[in-house]
Every structure is written in structure tokens, then in C-alpha cells.
Image (tube, grey):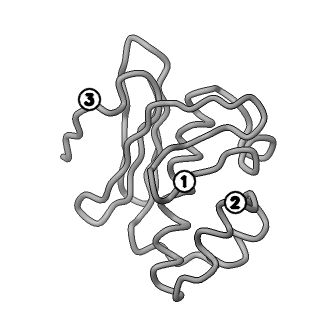
């Protein structure tokens, strides 16, 4: 089981296998350029640095929720692991920079919330909004 809460919302993920989930308001204001430069690997920065402010904010938030879900999936620390994950924004593939792990991952936006699920079966998972 994995859970994430933000504001007045809660996302629970249940699976027989390890799973990680994350949830953030889709319109959450973030200092996208600063976050990207501090926490994203150079290959990912190169994919995003040309974006205008709003598409950059959206891409950084999408990457962030996937990475946070991946860290929960592996039961690791956000501070120790965040900079090690890279999202290929063209393919949607999430890759761990140190050990090369490429977990199943799925994300999207539902009801004003940006969500992500990472772990075995993530691509076949169902999302129920309540």
C-alpha cells in the first residue's frame, strides 16, 4: 500500500506488489526553473529548458510526482533519491540514474489533481476518484 495526501485530497494505492503513488494539485505553483536546475539530471534539463513558463511548470510537476511515487515504491528517502531519477519526457520512461531501474509508471491529471503510480502493474492500474 502507498498513500499520498495534498490539501483536501488523498490517494491510496493498493497492490500485492510494492507500489508508490503521489498526488499534487495540477495548478500548484512551483518555482519550476529553480527546481529543475537543483534536482533534475542534465539530460532531463536539456529536454525542458526551452519551454515557456507554464509548460515548464506543468512538465516539472509531472516529473516530480512520478519521481516521488518511484521513491515511495522503493521505500527510499526523497532527499537522497530525487536527483537520481530521470524522466524522458518524449517516451515517458522513468530511469534511476545509479542502478538503471526502469519501473512501470503511469501518471495523469484527474479532477484538477496531478497523480502518479509506480511499480509492477502501474500501467494496468485503475484510478477511482471519489
Instruction: State the CA–CA distance, disc 2 to disc 3.
Output: 28 Å
For marks 3 and 1, give the CA distance.
20 Å
- Crowding around mark 1 (Cα neighbors within 10 Å: few <14, some 14 to 19, many 20+) is few
Residue at 37% x, 57% y is 8
- Identified at 63% across, 36% down, the residue is 71
Sort mark 2 into few (<14), some (14-19) or many (20+) by Cα contacts within 10 Å: few
**Whether residue 97 is situated above or below residue 103 in the rendered picture:** below
Residue 68, percent from left and from top: 58, 45
Q: CA distance from mark 2 to mark 1?
A: 8 Å
Which residue matches tag 2?
43
Task: Specify whether 99 is left or right of 11.
Answer: right
Mark sitting earlier along the chain (2/3)? 2
- Point out the tag, 3 or 1, that comes first from the N-terminus: 1
Asked whether the residues under the numbered discs 3 and 1 touch, taking CB atoms below 8 Å apart as contact, a structural biologist would say: no
Residue 25 falls in which quadrant of the image?
A: bottom left
The residue shown at (45%, 50%) is: 92
Q: Position of residue 32 (x, y in %)?
A: 62, 76
Q: Which residue is mark 3?
A: 124
Cβ atoms under marks 2 and 1 closer than 8 Å: yes
N-terminal of the two: label 2 or label 1?
Answer: 2
Image point (42%, 46%), residue name: 116
Q: Which mark is residue 9?
A: none
Instruction: Classify mark 2: helix, strand or loop.
Output: helix
> Disc 1 marks which residue?
88
Quadrant in the picture for residue 110: bottom left
Q: Secondary structure at mark 3?
A: helix
Q: Position of residue 82 (x, y in %)?
A: 71, 48
Tell me the mark number nearer the camera, choosing from 2 and 3: 2
Which residue appears farthest toward the bottom when viewing the image? 52
Of residue 51 and residue 29, the one placed in the foreground of this image is 51
Residue 106: image quadrant is top left
Q: In front: mark 3 or mark 1? A: 1
Amino acid at each position: 500500500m502507498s498513500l499520498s495526501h495534498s490539501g483536501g485530497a488523498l490517494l491510496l494505492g493498493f497492490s500485492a506488489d510494492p507500489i508508490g503513488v503521489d498526488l499534487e494539485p495540477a495548478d500548484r505553483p512551483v518555482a519550476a526553473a529553480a527546481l529543475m536546475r537543483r534536482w533534475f539530471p542534465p539530460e532531463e534539463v536539456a529536454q525542458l529548458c526551452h519551454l515557456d513558463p507554464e509548460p515548464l511548470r506543468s512538465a516539472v510537476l509531472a516529473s516530480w510526482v512520478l519521481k516521488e511515487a518511484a521513491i515511495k515504491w522503493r521505500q527510499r528517502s526523497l532527499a537522497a533519491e530525487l536527483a537520481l531519477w530521470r524522466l524522458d519526457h518524449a517516451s515517458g520512461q522513468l530511469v534511476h540514474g545509479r542502478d538503471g531501474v526502469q519501473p512501470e509508471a503511469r501518471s495523469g491529471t484527474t479532477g484538477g489533481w496531478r497523480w502518479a503510480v509506480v511499480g509492477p502493474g502501474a500501467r494496468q492500474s485503475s484510478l477511482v476518484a471519489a
